[in-house]
Image (spheres, rainbow, N blue to C red):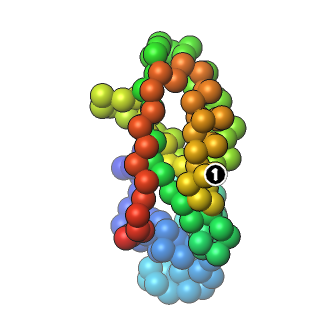
C-alpha cells in the first residue's frame, strides 16, 4: 500500500504530524500544491486509512498527570485466547496510554500515566496486576521527559 504514496503524499503526512490543525491553505503552500488538489489528497489519505484521525497534544503537567511509568508485563499464557483477553482488558484501563506486544523476555510494555506514585501504585496493584494472565510486572519510572 505504501507504493501508492508519492513524494507529495509523504510531505502532507509529515506536515500533518507536525501540526494537525494547519489550514489546508497553509498545508498546500508548504507542500507546493494549490488548495483543491491538497484537499483531494488529504481526503484520499483519510479514505485509504493513512490518516486515521486528528488529535490534540495536551500538557499533562498542567492536567496533573505528570507521573509516567513504563511497565513490563509477563503473562503466564501466551496462546491466542489469553492474548486476546489481555488485549481487550488492558484497553479498559484509562491510565494505560500505550500498550505494545514486545518480542523480548517479557510480553507487553505499557506506558502508564498517573498523577503521582501513589496513584500509580494503586493502578498497578488494582488494575494492571488483575489483568487476565498477568504473571509478573516490572516498573520503570520516568525521571524526565527529554523528547
Q: Position of residue 34 (x, y in %)?
A: 54, 83
Q: Position of residue 114 (x, y in %)?
A: 61, 56
Residue 40 appears left or right of 71: right
Q: Residue at x 48, y 51 (%)?
A: 69
Q: Position of residue 8 (x, y in %)?
A: 42, 70
Q: Position of residue 30 (x, y in %)?
A: 46, 84
- Could you tell me which quadrant the C terminus lies in? bottom left
Could you say whether the residue bearing mark 1 is in a helix, strand or loop?
Answer: helix
Total residue callouts:
1
Along the viewing direction, whichever of 101 and 33 lies nearer the viewer: 101
- Could you tell me which quadrant the N terminus lies in? top left
Along the viewing direction, whichever of 57 and 75 lies nearer the viewer: 75
Q: Residue at x 56, y 86 (%)?
A: 26
Q: From this view, report whether residue 57 is shown above or below residue 107.
A: below
Q: Residue at x 43, y 43 (%)?
A: 139
Q: From this view, report whether residue 12 is shown above or below residue 81.
A: below
Residue closest to the far front: 118
Q: Which residue is mark 1?
A: 119
Along the viewing direction, whichever of 84 and 105 lies nearer the viewer: 105
Q: Residue at x 57, y 65 (%)?
A: 66
Using the rendered image of the protein, determine whether residue 128 is visible from the camera's viewpoint: yes
Name the quadrant containing residue 90. top right
Q: Residues within 10 Å of mark 1 (few under 14, many from 20)?
A: some
Using the rendered image of the protein, determine whether residue 113 is visible from the camera's viewpoint: no
Residue closest to the far left: 104
Amino acid at each position: 500500500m505504501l507504493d501508492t504514496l508519492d513524494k507529495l503524499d509523504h510531505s502532507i503526512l509529515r506536515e500533518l504530524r507536525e501540526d494537525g490543525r494547519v489550514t489546508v491553505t497553509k498545508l498546500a503552500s508548504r507542500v507546493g500544491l494549490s488548495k483543491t488538489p491538497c484537499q483531494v489528497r488529504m481526503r484520499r489519505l483519510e479514505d485509504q486509512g493513512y490518516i486515521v484521525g486528528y488529535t490534540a497534544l495536551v500538557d499533562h503537567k498542567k492536567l496533573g498527570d505528570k507521573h509516567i511509568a513504563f511497565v513490563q508485563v509477563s503473562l503466564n499464557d501466551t496462546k491466542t485466547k489469553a492474548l486476546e483477553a489481555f488485549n481487550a482488558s488492558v484497553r479498559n484501563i484509562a491510565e494505560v496510554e500505550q500498550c505494545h506486544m514486545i518480542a523480548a523476555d517479557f510480553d507487553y510494555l505499557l506506558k502508564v500515566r498517573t498523577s503521582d506514585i501513589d496513584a500509580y501504585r494503586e493502578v498497578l496493584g488494582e488494575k494492571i496486576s488483575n489483568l487476565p494472565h498477568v504473571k509478573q510486572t516490572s516498573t520503570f519510572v520516568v525521571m524526565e521527559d527529554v523528547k
